[in-house]
Image: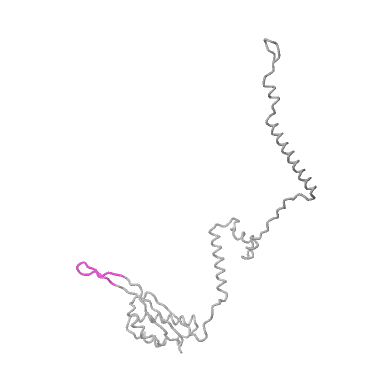
Amino acid sequence: MADRKTGKDTAPADAETKQDSPSAEQGKGAGKAAAADETAVAESTAQQQAEATGTKPKKAPARKPKTPKAEATAAEETGVDKEAAEAAEKSPAGQKASPANKTRARDKAESGRSRRAKSTPSDAPALPVGSRPMVRAHAKYVRTSARKARLVCDHIRGKSVDEAFAILAHTPRHVAEDWRKLLQSAVANAEHNHELLGDDLRIHAVTADEGPTLKRFRPRAMGRATKIRKRTSHLTITLTPKD
């Protein structure tokens, strides 16, 4: 650009500086090239040292695919493959089952195992040869006091089943009917569970224990109230074969 006064051409002052100073992109390219040269030099130096010593440079071992040891162990323990377990967890529509469904499936599996365990013969020792089976029957919360029940059971202790039925049939007490029903239940237990005959049984033990007492109140004169105790008892009969 020419100056009007002098007629000389003048160039902008920052032209030389722009041409002399490298751009940012050029600086980045030079840095990358230098880093690549250093890497190549290092590799060549390592190769020369390996050739001089007669050893080959070590290479990183290739990773082997993981073997499903855990899956194989679980399959051996449970007897169910992973694919079968995943298929069981999925619903018929192809969606995964909810946690509640998984819990139900787990409960079903556990119940099946318990049933199989019960079906197998147990290792419980059998009764000795000379031992006598004891058959029991219980009646709880009978609406009578233990004292009144003992007055009846003392008459049938040690008697045979036929004699006990006869005694209870002619006993003029309300609790005698409860003892008769309990004796029938004990005989049914012996016949059904132990394959015994009722005619061959006798009463080995008979007890009447106190149960909870019901509290009631009765109105009396002059606005007072007296307590009423309605007592209950637990009755037990034990049968055994005759001698």
Question: Measured along the vertical axis of the image, is residue 42 above or below residue 170?
Answer: above
Q: Which corner quadrant of the image does residue 74 belong to?
A: bottom right
In the image: residue 107, left or right of residue 215: right
Residue found 71% across the figure and 12% down from its top: 8
At x 79%, y 49%, the residue is: 53
Location of residue 4 (image quadrant): top right
Residue 224 in the image, given as x and y percentages of width and height = 22, 68
Rendered residue at 68%/12% (across/down): 3
- 231 and 185: which is toward the camera: 231
The residue furthest front is 53
Name the residue nearer the viewer: 165 or 70.
Answer: 70
Decide which of 16, 115 is in the foreground and name it.
16
Q: Name the image quarter holding the N terminus.
A: top right
Percent x, y of residue 18: 68, 24
User: Please, which residue is most extreme toward the top here?
Assistant: 5
Expressed as whole percent of the image width and height from the top left, the position of residue 170 reads 34, 86
Residue at image position (35%, 72%) is 212
| Along the line of sight, the residue nearer the viewer: 199 or 28 | 28
Q: Is residue 224 magenta?
A: yes
Give residue 76's quadrant in the image: bottom right
Counting the numbered discs, the total is: 0
In the figure, 39 relative to 90: above or below? Answer: above
How far across and down, in percent of the image, does residue 111 sit?
A: 54, 67
Q: From this view, report whether residue 30 is shown above or below residue 50.
A: above
| Prevailing SS of the magenta stretch | strand
Residue at the extreme bottom: 243
Colour logic = one colour
Q: In the rendered structure, which segment of residues is drawn in magenta?
A: 215-228
Q: Does the magenta stretch include residue 218?
A: yes
